[in-house]
Structures are given as structure tokens and as C-alpha cells.
Image (tube, rainbow, N blue to C red):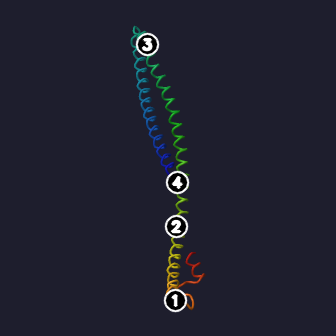
Amino acid sequence: MQAGTLEVGRGAELADQAGRSLDEIAETARATKEASMEIAGAVSAIQEATGGVVAATDAIGGIATKTRRASNRMSSTSDTVISAAESIGAVAEENSAAFEEVSAATAEMSVQTAGLVSSVAVLSDMSADLRRVLAKFALGEEVSSAPASLPDRTEWRRRVA
């Protein structure tokens, strides 16, 4: 059961990691959008002022570098998210199997406990009957047959079943 708890903890950690990765993807997408908007502004500036071509080219180069970095981060983050999702799926399968095993073991233990309780009750009755019979022997009384309260073998078997 402790292993199942550890697996659940590991799954929660992986889910948290996946959430952080998704936040990174969102940030990267926002950065990419901003970069795209900056590129559009730079292109407009080039069309309006041919004198600033060199400065605009430098700005576009910087933006392209940002976009490439953002794209690389997005690709890396996507791989991380895919890996985390696969790990979460594996942990979920393992947890499911562990819970099924615990459930089956619990059901079996419940059946065995019920049988044990029944057997203890029968043994208790038999012990009380035996004490009564032995008490008669100790007192020197004559025992002509089994006491009326002492069940026969068929009755004991029925109680145990």
C-alpha cells in the first residue's frame, strides 16, 4: 500500500511538472506572438524609412534570435510535456493495478475473517460444553450421554460452514 502511495505521490509530482511545462509553453507562445508583432512593426518601419534599413535589419536579427530561442524552448518543453504525460499514464496504470490488488486482498481477508469468526464462535460453544461435561466428571456425577446442549458432529460442521 505504501508503494501505491509513493506512486501516487510521484504521479502528482509529474502532474505538477507537466503544469509548469504548460506554463512555459504559454509564456513561449506569448513571447513568439510579441516577437511576431515586433517583426511586423520592423517591416513597416523599413517600408516607411529607407534610411533606417541598417537599424531595422539589426532589430529584425535580434527578434529572429528571440524567435529561434523561443521556438527551441517550445520544442524542448513539448518533449518534456509528452514525456511527463507518458509517465503519468504509466503511473496511473500502476496505481490502478495496485488498487485492484489491494481490493482483491481486502475481499479475501474479509472472507477469511468471517470464517474465522464463525469458527471461533463454534469453538467457544464447544469449549463451554466440554467444561460442563468435565465439571460433571470432576464432581463424580454420572454422565449417561452427551448433554442436550452439546451439538453432534453434524451440528458442529453446520456451524463452521
Label 1 sits on residue: 140
Alpha carbon distance from label 1 to label 4: 61 Å
Of callouts 4 and 3, which one flags the residue occurring earlier in the amino acid sequence? Answer: 3
Residue 147 coordinates in the image, percent (x, y): 53, 88
Which of pointers 4 and 3 indicates the residue nearer the eye? 4
How would you rate the neighbour count of disc 3 (Cα within 10 Å): few for under 14, some for 14-19, many for 20 or more?
few
Q: Secondary structure at mark 1?
A: loop
- Seen from the viewer's position, the closer of residues 3 and 72 is 3
Residue 32 coordinates in the image, percent (x, y): 44, 26
Of callouts 1 and 3, which one flags the residue occurring earlier in the amino acid sequence? Answer: 3
Residue 71 coordinates in the image, percent (x, y): 49, 26
Q: At label 2, which amino acid type do we have?
A: Thr
The label shown at residue 99 is: 4
- Seen from the viewer's position, the closer of residues 148 and 81 is 148
How would you rate the neighbour count of disc 2 (Cα within 10 Å): few for under 14, some for 14-19, many for 20 or more?
few
Alpha carbon distance from label 2 to label 4: 21 Å
Label 2 sits on residue: 113
